[in-house]
Image (spheres, helix red, strand yellow):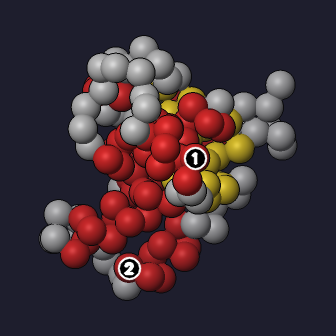
Amino acid sequence: MPMKYLLDTHTWIWMNAFPEEIPRSVAKLVERLGDEDELLLSAISILELCKLVEKGRVRLFEDLEVWVETALDTPRLRVVPVDFRVFYRSTTLPAPFHSDPADQMIVATARLEDATIITRDKLLRNYPHVKTCW
């Protein structure tokens, strides 16, 4: 059965800019994806990165637009748009869930796609209504 893995924003950034921050188990998981398996990225993660760079919280060593285009060229990576279903589902997640809208959309996307979120974020990892790994 094909597997789907949704990259949390920090995971996507680290995989492409700071691979030493990724645990070996996560790197191996991504390396061993089968032909039918998918890596997913919520479109909200692209906005999150842009805002982090804008606010100076993340520094990249090349032009942001070029960096994103290169990072999106990862094999088997599919960007999942933030559409009305994601917006709606992000507001109807089973309680309790924290109030970060980007995290809500990432979780809603994972639930819609039946994907496991690859994340270090303990708030997401402790949320019982979504599958995670790290």
State the residue in front, 88 or 60: 88
Amino acid at pointer 2: Leu
The answer to whether one can see residue 32 in this image is no
Mark positioned earlier in the residue sequence (2 or 1):
2
User: Is residue 81 shown above or below 97?
Assistant: below
Could you classify mark 2 by the number of other residues whose Cα lies within 10 Å: few (under 14), some (14-19), or many (20 or more)?
Answer: some
The answer to whether 26 appears left or right of 57 in the picture is right
Instruction: Look at label 1 and name its amino acid.
Output: Arg
Q: Is residue 107 left or right of residue 41?
A: left
Q: Position of residue 99 (x, y in %)?
A: 24, 38
Residue tagged 2: 64
Q: Is residue 85 visible?
A: yes
Mark 1: few, some, or many residues within 10 Å (few <14, many ≥20)? few
Tell me the quadrant of the picture where the C terminus can be found.
Answer: top left
* Residue 6, position as x, y percentages in the image: 55, 41
Q: Please tell me which residue is depicted at 33% across the width and 71% down the height of the picture.
A: 50
| The N terminus: image quadrant | top right
The residue that appears at 65% across and 30% down in the rendered structure is 114
| 109 relative to 57, above or below | above
Q: Residue furthest top?
A: 128
Q: Which residue is mark 1?
A: 85
| Callout 2 touching callout 1 (CB < 8 Å) | no
